[in-house]
Image (cartoon, grey):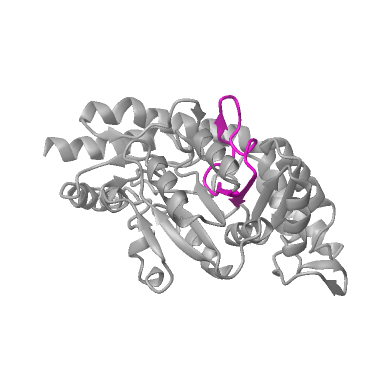
Amino acid sequence: MGVPFIDIKRFEPGFLEKWAEKVHSLSQNAQFIGGQENFDLEKTLSEWTGKTHSIACANGTDAIQIALRAVGVDRGDKVLLPDSTFWATFESVVNCGADPYTVDTSPDDLQMEFSEFEAAIDKVKPKAAILVHLYGWGSSKVEAFRSLCQNKGIPLVEDGAQCFGVKYKGEALYKKSLIATTSFYPAKVLGAAGDGGAIFTSDPELADKSRKLANHGRTSHYEHGSVGWNSRLDSLQAAFLNLSLEHLPMRIASRRKAAEFYYQNLPKLGIKTVHPPEGFEENGYCNVTLFSPEERPKIESVLKEKGIGFANIYPGAMSDQPGAKQHIQGRFGSKEEARRIAKSVLNFPLFAYMKEEELSEVLQVVQSYYKS
């Protein structure tokens, strides 16, 4: 039969009909930018994240850039970020005119290594830092990262593109951040019908700066207090997200059920399956397993042959990207864990409303590899 790595077409009964009605209504009234849909979305996002301010914008990359600028990052400033992340995190620093320094990865939770980060702060003395919450959970040291940055007076921007709906110690992971971001790329747990993103903060000054930066730095319609972006989320995307939020608890529960299937069954085959650190309630964004660099291509070959989708999130360190070489100013970590993990990580299919027979098929194909 075959199983895709992700299927974003599995909508709830009646969802597409409601979406069609929204499109018709918004189009009929030429309500394309701003308006009630955007207002409702930001209100609901604040309820989900525990932040007093949510600022919707055009995409997740813009969200990071806006957050960096809001905390004061400018040309020539130094910014620390993980060596294991998506390219958008790195390019956001460069697009702000700042200098990126990457920090290696912890082999324990596959997030940024705290001890290397601490050493980097003392050596680099950065203007800001970025903590990325990968895989639908976050760092086991999240509180230590926040506390250290607060004590050192270093704004910590939290890139939460993969963690919408994640809870830490019973609360939204975003809640105790200074400023955090997310992406509404369609493949995310909360995805739009196109690109979209948001910034979350409870600091009114950061919220005001972020909102202005997302709208050309406007202080009034034809007055601009700063150079910003054209990064408004359109009303159609807001409407799609509003409809999706009504069903998000059920979608996340479905994803967690699929994740649990892998936790229960893959270790029986001797596969190293990575779990969220203690205190985290994941959103089921993706399954994470680790193979030796020698074995991974072999099992990938079997998956391809049998029509089973897979991914490598992520297949390379930021410091090794061709586009990074002319911009990166330093790399912290002598153990090269980011590079090792990139050669080892393998992600099996996981998405909302996976069928039991699909999960069973994935498992059967993996089992056949070990029996051959």
**Residue 187 visible somewhere in the drawing:** no
How far from the left and from the top, in percent, is residue 250? 59, 32
For the image shown, how many numbered marks are present on the structure?
A: 0
How far from the left and from the top, in percent, is residue 173? 58, 35
How far from the left and from the top, in percent, is residue 53? 75, 45
Q: Is residue 158 magenta?
A: yes
62 left or right, relative to 33: left
In this orientation, which residue lies closer to the viewer: 249 or 362?
249
Image quarter of the C terminus: top left
**Magenta segment boundaries in residue numbering:** 154-183
Q: Is residue 352 above or below residue 89?
A: above
In this orientation, which residue lies closer to the viewer: 321 or 263?
321
Image quarter of the N terminus: top left
327 left or right, relative to 316: right
How far from the left and from the top, in percent, is residue 100? 47, 62
**Residue 69 visible somewhere in the drawing:** yes
Residue displayed at 48% across by 38% down: 138
